[in-house]
Image: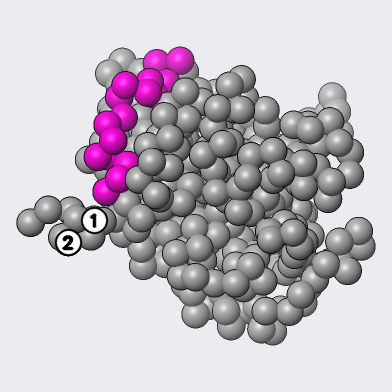
Amino acid sequence: MSELATGPRFDVVGVGLNATDTLILLPRFPAYGGKVPFQEEVMSPGGQVASALVACARLGLRVKYIGSVGDDERGRIQMESLLAAGVNVDHVQIRRNCPNQSAYILVDRSTGERTVLWKRPECLRIDPDEIAPEQITCGRLLHIDGHDTPAVAHAAAIARRAGMPVTVDVDTIYHGFDRVLPNVDYLVSSSEFPASWTSESDPLRALELIQNEYGMRVAAMTLGAHGALARTCGRYYYSPGFVVECIDTTGAGDVFHGAFCYAVLEGMSMEETLEFSNAMAALNCRALGARGGIATRREALEFARRAERRSHPDFARYRRHA
């Protein structure tokens, strides 16, 4: 039977980073030039797109990951995690004699905040010609990040021609990213990206400029503990963050993006999408690791109904109730 007759095999296809993290747990972060004994060392899988896809899978979506892993122990840990979550890895390339992307994450146990030191070997780079159209069009939605920019630009162009929505997670400026943005439907960036990209310090105006230039449906940014802000159909929407007993903020943004992809496919309103994504991100902070606390839809919705909120004073006026 053809794909046209049966429909796409996957709900979400992701192209982008994975990493294997070493979490170093500290009683408190030392002052510059100081030192402090660490309490524990934990190896844990992570990475922007890979962790977002694991969140999608745990929410019940059919998920495919396209990327590269090293053939070392860290690469093995990553592959085992993806397979255990039910993520399709048919087009993950295992690079011989190449270490996997790694990160050393210093977690301040007094706050749960983390500081990330990372390295990605050049031997992990994905080239555009390694991604065939059918690897993308087997899904309903494409999720990408900003790394390997020519490859994700190629994937986004394929998705656009196929009429697939494209979501992107971007935290900094990448050379050539202007070739990605024209094919993006949902930009969800870090709080720093809009101002850096547009040289406009007002975040509201910066989101408007990006959206007007590239014609995307939604231009949004995450605000850490203060939630998320989005612009769509000429209006701003703000959803405050949730207060939780934070163990580790690692992966909160990745889980936010996975939940956002799920909400888009479920047809949630923008208010519901931001609320749900914020709740999923907050719940993930209650456990160690990028994927340590990924919740179910029911858990996130119940949590959102009763949890205390943390609102950003600059954006509170744009809060609309789901």
Range covered by the magenta-colored residues: 122-138
> Residue 114: horizontal and vertical position, in percent?
69, 44
Q: Is residue 182 above or below residue 292?
A: above
Which residue lies at the image location 42% right of the left edge and 21% below the top edge?
125
Residue with the mark numbered 2: 6
The amino acid on which the numbered mark 2 sits, given as a three-letter code, is Thr
Q: How is colour applied across the structure in the image? A: one colour
- Given residues 149 and 222, the one toward you in this image is 149
Name the residue: 36% across, 67% down: 60
Residue 101 in magenta stretch: no
Classed neighbour count for the residue bearing mark 2: other residues with Cα under 10 Å, few (<14), some (14–19), many (≥20): few
- Dividing the picture into quadrants, the one containing residue 245 is bottom right
For mark 1, give the secondary structure.
loop
- Compared across the picture, whether 277 is left or right of 32 comes to left
Are the residues tagged 2 and 1 within 8 Å (C-beta)? yes
- Residue type (three-letter) at the residue carrying disc 1: Arg
Is 218 situated left or right of 310 in this image?
left
Tag 1 residue:
9
Residue most extreme to the left: 1
